[in-house]
Amino acid sequence: MLNAVSRLACRILPLLPAVGLGAVAEPSEFFEKRIRPLLIEHCTECHGADKQKGSLRLDHRDGWQTGGDSGPSIIPGNIEQSLLWKVVSYEDRDLKMPPKKKLPAAALEDLKTWIASGAHDPRDEAPAAKGGHSSPKADGSFWSFQLPVAKPPGPIKQSNWPRNAIDHFILARLEAENLQPAPDADAATLARRLAFDLTGLPPQSIPALADHQPALEDRKLETQVDALLASPAFAERWASHFMDITRFAESSGGGRSLPFKDAWRFRDYLLEAIQSDVPVDHMIKQMLAGDLLPAKNAAERRQNLTATGFLALGPTNYEEQDKQMLRMDIVDEQLDTIGKSFMGMTIGCARCHDHKFDPIPTRDYYALAGIMRSTRTLKNYTDNVAHWIDTPLPFEGEEEQKMQAKEKEVSRLTQEIAALKDTLRDVGGVALRKRKTLNAADLPGVVVDDSEAQKVGDWKTSRRYPPFIGGGYAHDDNLGRGEKTISFTPKLPVAGRYEVRVAFSAGPGRAERIPATIFHADGEELVYFKQATESFEGLQFISIGTFRFETTGQNFVMLSNAGAEGYVTVDAVQFVPADADMPAMPSPVASNEEKELKGRMADLQKQLKLMQMDGPNRLEAMTVAEDEKPEDARIHVRGNIRNLGAPVPRGFLQVALKADMPAIPAEQSGRMQLAEWMTARHHPLTARVFVNRVWHWLFGAGIVRSTDNFGITGEQPSHPELLDHLAVKFMEDGWSLKRLVKEMVMSRTYRMSSEGELSQTDPDNRLLSRMNRKRLDAECIRDAMLAAANAVDGRWAGPNVGDAKAVNSNDTKVQNLEYGYPFNDTRRSVYTAAFRNVRHPLFEVFDFADINQPIAQRTTSTVATQALYLMNHPQVIEFARSAATRVMAAGEIEKGIQQAYRHSLSREPSSKEASIAKDYLEASISGNATEEERCDAWARLIQTLWATPEFRLLR
């Protein structure tokens, strides 16, 4: 029996955990029976051949030896240094694997034994992926990472067809595929196409309709194009395109959506720059580093500063309490925007791991991240609700001197008032602190003592550090973190705004960060305040904000010890009236000294108010600024802000470095060098991406149809030589947008008709044997209706959301501005309020760009809601009635019909169309119809024209 037991033990013992021994008797058998099944069941689904989260594989030995983003996963024989053990044991609060459920205790013990015993692993080769071949990955040889080089077009047979070099490239490709270009569009079609493409409005004059009428002669066309390019409407139209690729918005979106009161200045910057034909490379430099650029005068300085709003306008959750997470999220959004806006690259994919498809390693991402982390986008990282940077803008010459003198005087008065407030506080404080105890009546406003508060958890009462209000003060005994709250509910005599002050016993051992939740008439607010002091001990008051309270309803302030490191003390909460028109409340009898100080302060406050009202006030713009302490970023392993790797020197994408770039000085962020690299002649992407987008906006599809993606997952260019020709010429022409647009629209390719049969050789019209039909975008549809109604408010530039200027980001009612916005203005659509959560209803229906990310290529859908909107929306009906009133003024029904077609479709009606419209109107309007009934009939006719595909499409 003994021998049998011994034999059984010899077979079982090698399979049992050898805790404390550091070895197993049969490593191969232990691995096959315990470790391999464990890894297959719990690990290789996410860290195997088909998927490698964190770039880690656990399906072969080299996988865990090399490790993932964090380095080797196992150090054989060393449990404490093995990252795999750290994550499966759930020691790391930010990274726990498997993420859904901790491994069973027996499995953990097996892993521990395996690692401690040397991690024997016989798996020499990596298994092949079951899901087939993985997607190919681009490297530096990919076409978009090569410098654009101008090459001559191929030979052509029809030498009389081209008007410029663009036509040579297009025709050479068509002839190579045995295709013929379509005939020229008729003059009316071309006039409408040009007007909407260049200005976003219908043409002001309509060429006479004639069968087979050729396009305008070159000289006549050039005159027309020059006039359109010079018009303010061109800047308004093309600013919309730039707003798409810079994700322009007038609210923050995330969390509590805050309105950007000065975002309109960035839109105006785009308008002015496009109108003045500022070179696009200079615009990019201004957006990335305008605050660092030299300026000849105040106007140029204002433009440079305002342009940096590009970096500040992103979707941001300013309420994020983890400020380091907020900081990195802003940097990530900025890099993602820079990559997509200017390079057509998804840089943001490399935050957590090397880009899966394009040659952008994580190191390159953090080289760029160091530049943006050395740039300030927020005022600070301590406010409960963070805030963007509002930078004062300079005035010109003498006006600036007057402004500086005014600001100096305002500063003096403000400082004197603040000093008086401190003196008054001290006058009362010194007198009060001489006592051991205070009564609520000794303090102004409504005071709720801790003895009247509602307590949850075990709060202690103390009288150790006088003075105190009432019979003592409460403290949490520095125990039960997160288990204790204390709530103060006031009985307020009148509704209004009250300053909320917390009275507490301060001292060195008190908490650094205490949460206070204020429930008020406009919602609830969470703020944090500090009680710790270096040496002072005793009664202190701190203001935690001013809020509106009703006399009825749920008004209270709740303090907690959640997350507090140190003692939390509470003596009372004081509610002091803050509105000037609120009746005075009982307060302690003031001394003569205090009365004199208050009188002096009232005089100064009156002077300050008059000074602030006198003359112009300083304008502000959303900007960024250099950080005081620039630094290189450390790699955030798997994108985790708390799992930091090695630092990476600030720099750029290595794959796009085709020449030496100046080093980034240690004392600078690197934004200036980033802007220079982005716009350098030897950058392979920036000019290519931009000219391709302009082509897309004019021709309806880019030469590279994936206009926002020039990586390997994007499409190849249909005419690579033409794309390079345009990019090189664009740079040689000084990055002029207007010259680029003119060259494209003057081509015969742009003038072709969109009619004709589809080619089986080229069904998607990639080779451009005809012009693409294009659906008008949302702005053009709205502006076309306004133009037909003769209702366009023609004001150029300027603010469009007036109520945003007075909004306090700590006030919950700010969201009412966005969610209740009426959208009833009649300015051009480029000025329509661009809120992130609420858009104009027409924009929602007609595929407006995703305002949360840069995008050049909008979705184009055809859905029932579009027809329903044009038929039923009150604003459309109102516009149609205005348009009806306009055509009714013609008097005769035939002339009215003719004008209705001109105003809505930019052409004359055919005889059949005119006859049908006349029959309808005569049948709808009786002899004794009122003016309103006649207007309704004409409005229905006009709405019918707006509902046609011809109104929505450009031929």
Image (cartoon, rainbow, N blue to C red):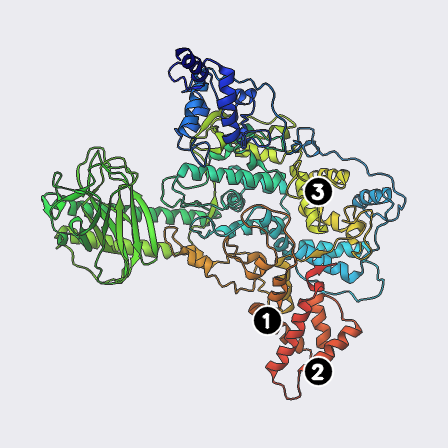
Q: Residue 816: percent from the left, percent from the top?
A: 42, 59
User: Circle 3 is placed at which residue position?
Assistant: 704
Q: Quadrant of residue 862?
A: bottom right
| Three-letter amino acid code at the position of disc 1 | Ile
Q: Quadrant of residue 876?
A: bottom right
Taking the image as drawn, is residue 594 in sight?
Answer: yes
Q: Residue 35: percent from the left, percent from the top?
A: 49, 23
User: Circle 2 is placed at which residue position?
Assistant: 922
Q: Residue 43: percent from the left, percent from the top?
A: 51, 30
Outermost residue toward the right? Answer: 157
Q: Secondary structure at mark 3?
A: loop
How far separated are the C-alphas under marks 1 and 2?
A: 21 Å
Which of 130 and 424 lies nearest the eye of the viewer? 130
Which of 48 and 210 lies nearest the eye of the viewer? 48
Outermost residue toward the front? Answer: 1
| Three-letter amino acid code at the position of disc 3 | Val
